[in-house]
Amino acid sequence: MLLGTFAPKLDDKGRIILPAKFWDEFSGGVVLTRGQERAVFMYSQREFENVHEQMRQASTGSKRTRDFLRLFLSGASQEIPDKQRRITIPPLLRDYAGLDRDLTVIGAGGRAEIWSTSAWNDYTAATEAAFADADEEVIPGLF
């Protein structure tokens, strides 16, 4: 399970060093793709195959489903970490998420998310109050 918040830097070649706590999960390779709220989603190869299998079960009769699948999968890129545990974030995804030198990488359970630090700060500022003040069940049976 991927947990925590990290602050790697994007180098001049568009690479980041994977957080050490994520290394076991990602050492065999990662799949990067567009995520919601303009973040880059990062999955292990195994987890991405699970996600893709769930997507294959979705009906493509809905235009909304087709649109989502097209954008999600067309932006996907398989990356193998180098010996320094770096991966390259492709230009398409760097542009999509507005990534510059300062990044925030968060663990989100089965995936990690790569955010521009300024976008992450804006997101948390806009959503933390609602999180703290939640007075109804958000996740059935849990919160």
Image (cartoon, rainbow, N blue to C red):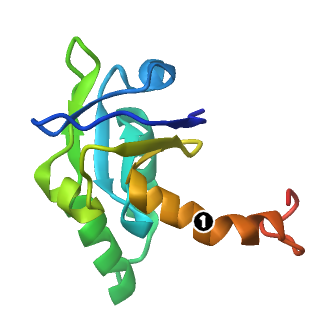
Estimate the x, y position of residue 28 in percent, counting from the top left: 32, 22
Badge 1 is on which residue?
125
Q: Amino acid at mark 1?
A: Ala
Determine whether 119 is above or below 108 in the image.
below
Determine whether 124 is above or below 84 in the image.
below
Seen at 50% across and 65% down, the residue is 122
Crowding around mark 1 (Cα neighbors within 10 Å: few <14, some 14 to 19, many 20+) is few
Estimate the x, y position of residue 96 in percent, counting from the top left: 24, 64
Quadrant housing residue 60 = bottom left
Horizontal side of 116 relative to 110 (left or right) equals left
Q: Quadrant of the C terminus?
A: bottom right
Seen at 20% across and 18% down, the residue is 82
Estimate the x, y position of residue 129 in percent, counting from the top left: 74, 69
Q: Nearer the viewer, residue 21 or 45?
A: 21
Quadrant housing residue 13 = top left
Seen at 75% across and 65% down, the residue is 131
Q: Nearer the viewer, residue 55 or 3?
A: 3
Q: Nearer the viewer, residue 54 or 23?
A: 23
The answer to whether one can see residue 111 in this image is no
The answer to whether one can see residue 93 in this image is yes
